[in-house]
Image: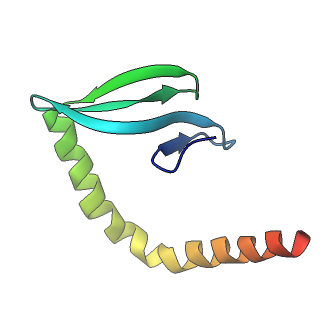
């Protein structure tokens, strides 16, 4: 089970594909420290131009997602209440 300071990337079935434990910097690259498939330690790099792509995704994708957000939020809340009733 991941700790509170880890960020998990999950697959379609909910299994943890990668848990990111820390971020660092080496020169103009971001270094990602974590574990693949919750077992193998790994160290990955993101180059400068890819960092810019990520920033563009973060800034401009929400514009497309925002109109859908109330529906996604409603579905999450409804699912949470259904789970609570079953227990």
Return the residue nearer the eye: 61 or 18.
Answer: 18
Which x, y percent locates residue 61? 33, 61
Q: How many numbered dots are placed on residues in this image?
A: 0
Q: Quadrant of residue 83?
A: bottom right
Residue at image x 51%, y 43%? 8
Position of 29 relative to 42 (above/below): below
The structure residue drawn at horizontal position 58% and vertical position 29%, both measured from the top left corner, is 38
Q: Is residue 1 left or right of residue 21?
A: right
Seen at 37% across and 68% down, the residue is 64
- Which quarter of the picture shows residue 43? top left
Q: Nearer the viewer, residue 35 or 60?
A: 35
Image side of residue 76 versus residue 70, left or right: right
Q: Residue furthest left?
A: 27
Q: Which color scheme does this rendered protein use?
A: rainbow
Q: Position of residue 66 (x, y in %)?
A: 40, 74
Outermost residue on the right side: it is 86
The residue shown at (9%, 28%) is 27
Residue 21 placement: quadrant: top left
Is 17 drawn above or below residue 64 in the view shown?
above
The N terminus - image quarter: top right
Location of the C terminus by quadrant is bottom right
Taking the image as shown, residue 41 lies to the left or right of residue 30, namely right
């Amino acid at each position: 089970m991941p700790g509170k300071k880890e960020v998990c990337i999950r697959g379609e079935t909910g299994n943890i594909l990668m848990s990111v434990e820390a971020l660092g910097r080496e020169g103009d690259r971001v270094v990602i420290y974590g574990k693949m498939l919750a077992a193998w330690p790994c160290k990955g790099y993101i180059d400068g131009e890819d960092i810019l792509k990520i920033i563009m995704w973060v800034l401009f994708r929400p514009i497309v997602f925002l109109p859908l957000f109330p529906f996604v939020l409603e579905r999450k809340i409804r699912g949470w209440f259904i789970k609570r009733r079953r227990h």
